[in-house]
């Protein structure tokens, strides 16, 4: 029953789409009007920037883990850096 309802609603929306928004309307819009429709909110832009920054951090961490993993699996071990020790 739910599928039938969804199909009816979709059919109505698609049938009225050409009346709601046409290519000629889009062509007559100013750059500001198009930008207003297409641009993401400042909050969403900030969220995307934050997520991209986090993704880059995770990629760097994954690369470090892969480098460490290669040292462990090839039988060599990472040695602590004792260059500051006085022997």
Image (cartoon, rainbow, N blue to C red):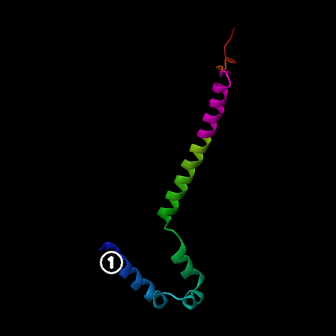
Give the percent coordinates (x, y) of residue 65. 60, 34
Stretch of the chain drawn in magenta: 61-78
Of residues 12 and 43, the one drawn nearer to the viewer in this rendering: 12
Of residues 1 and 16, the one drawn nearer to the viewer in this rendering: 1
- Disc 1 residue crowd, few under 14, some 14–19, many 20+, Cα 10 Å: few
Please identify the quarter of the rendering in which residue 6 is found: bottom left
Q: Residue at x 51, y 68 (%)?
A: 40
Where 71 falls versus 45 (above or below)? above
| Horizontal relation, residue 21 to residue 60: left or right | left
Work out which quarter of the rendered image holds the C terminus and state it.
Answer: top right
Of residues 30 and 1, the one drawn nearer to the viewer in this rendering: 1
Where 41 falls versus 17 (above or below)? above
Task: Give SS at disc 1.
Answer: helix
| Horizontal relation, residue 77 to residue 37: left or right | right
Where 25 falls versus 65 (above or below)? below
Pointer 1 residue: 5
Of residues 41 and 21, the one drawn nearer to the viewer in this rendering: 21
Q: Residue at x 65, y 21 (%)?
A: 77
The question of residue 65 being in magenta is answered with yes
Q: Residue at x 62, y 41 (%)?
A: 60
| Horizontal relation, residue 11 to residue 34: left or right | left
Give the percent coordinates (x, y) of residue 29. 57, 87
Give the percent coordinates (x, y) of residue 61. 59, 39
Magenta residues, dominant SS class: helix
Q: Residue at x 52, y 53 (%)?
A: 50
Work out which quarter of the rendered image holds the N terminus and state it.
Answer: bottom left
| Horizontal relation, residue 17 to residue 26: left or right | left
Please identify the quarter of the rendering in which residue 86 is found: top right
Give the percent coordinates (x, y) of residue 36. 52, 77
Please identify the quarter of the rendering in which residue 8 is found: bottom left
């Amino acid at each position: 029953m739910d599928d039938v309802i969804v199909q009816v609603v979709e059919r109505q929306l698609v049938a009225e789409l050409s009346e709601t928004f046409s290519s000629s309307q889009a062509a007559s819009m100013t750059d500001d009007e198009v930008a207003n429709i297409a641009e993401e909110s400042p909050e969403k832009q900030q969220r995307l920037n934050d997520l991209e920054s986090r993704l880059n951090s995770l990629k760097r961490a994954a690369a470090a883990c892969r480098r460490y993993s290669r040292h462990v699996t090839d039988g060599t071990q990472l040695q602590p850096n004792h260059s500051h020790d006085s022997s």
